[in-house]
Image (spheres, rainbow, N blue to C red):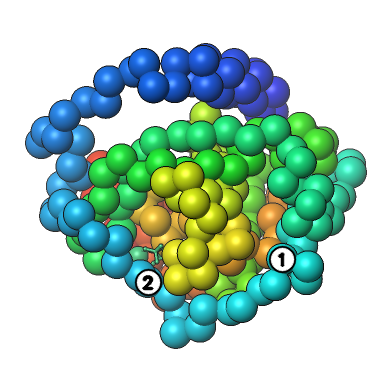
Amino acid sequence: MSKARYISAKEAWARKQVAQGVTAREEASAKRLPPGQRLTTGFPVLDLGIKPEIPLADWTLSILGEVAQPLTLDWETFASLPQVEDVSDFHCVTTWSKYDCRWGGVAFTELYERVQPTKAAQFVYFTGYDGYTTNVPLAQCLDDDVLIATKFDGEPVSREHGGPARVIIPKLYAWKGAKFVKEIHFLSKDKLGFWEVRGYSNSADPFKEERYA
Ligand SMILES: Nc1nc2c(c(=O)[nH]1)N[C@H]1C(S)=C(S)[C@@H](COP(=O)(O)O)O[C@H]1N2
Ligand SMILES: [Mo]
């Protein structure tokens, strides 16, 4: 189902890596800041009160469900995958936004390619080491700005911001990106995550101000 979309995202990633440092970013503008958001220059921390400590030697990321080749990657293997960098804006539903976050890590499309999702795969359900869960349609995970980030501003993602690895999906409110990511489930049917079952919007588009269901 997502073949064409996945291929165009891969090509876009390649172009972006070539253009690094050349493309000037759009200045702050009313168009850039989603409705009801305020710009912050700090980086607030939002979690469930748990910041799990995961030694890299114990860390794994599993990709399972509707896939032909389920995978469990250890830290070394994950770090050996092709790495990308992307600068994006971060929008939290609690009304703060942060511009120009420079994330580095592995593109979602890279993992998609390796596990070979079945035709039935339409949704993705992420779990975190803190017990957090969230869900996103597969098509949106294939955008060329979605990555599993291990770096922020060139440094390892700190524990408070979701290290060793966190999901970044810039076009959606930030609760859709699991910090401390542990598992990526490909599903045929949608399954609501932690905040989605508590009344947050399932679609979560900040520019449509989709905060609550
Ligand atoms: N595992 C996990 N991921 C999570 C959360 C969480 O509590 N646990 N909070 C979400 C919310 S609501 C937001 S706004 C962002 C916050 O990321 P930050 O703490 O780096 O600002 O992470 C999202 N991902
Ligand atoms: Mo949030």
Considering every residue shown, the one lying at the far right of the view is 69
Give the quadrant of residue 208: top left
Q: Amino acid at mark 2?
A: Leu
Q: Quadrant of the C terminus?
A: bottom left
| Label drawn at residue 56 | 1
Q: Residue at x 25, y 66 (%)?
A: 94
Q: Residue at x 16, y 29 (%)?
A: 27
Q: Residues within 10 Å of mark 2 (few under 14, many from 20)?
A: some
Residue 112 pos. (x, y %): 72, 37
Q: Residues within 10 Å of mark 1 (few under 14, many from 20)?
A: few
Q: Is residue 145 left or right of residue 61?
A: left
Q: Residue at x 45, y 71 (%)?
A: 160
Q: Amino acid at mark 1?
A: Leu
Considering every residue shown, the one lying at the far left of the view is 30
Determine the CA span between mark 2 and mark 1: 22 Å
Q: Is residue 129 left or right of residue 31?
A: right
Q: Secondary structure at mark 1?
A: loop
Q: Nearer the viewer, mark 2 or mark 1?
A: 1
Q: Is residue 124 above or below residue 25?
A: below
Give whichever of 110, 154 is nearer the camera: 154
Q: Residue at x 49, y 64 (%)?
A: 158
Circle 2 residue: 46
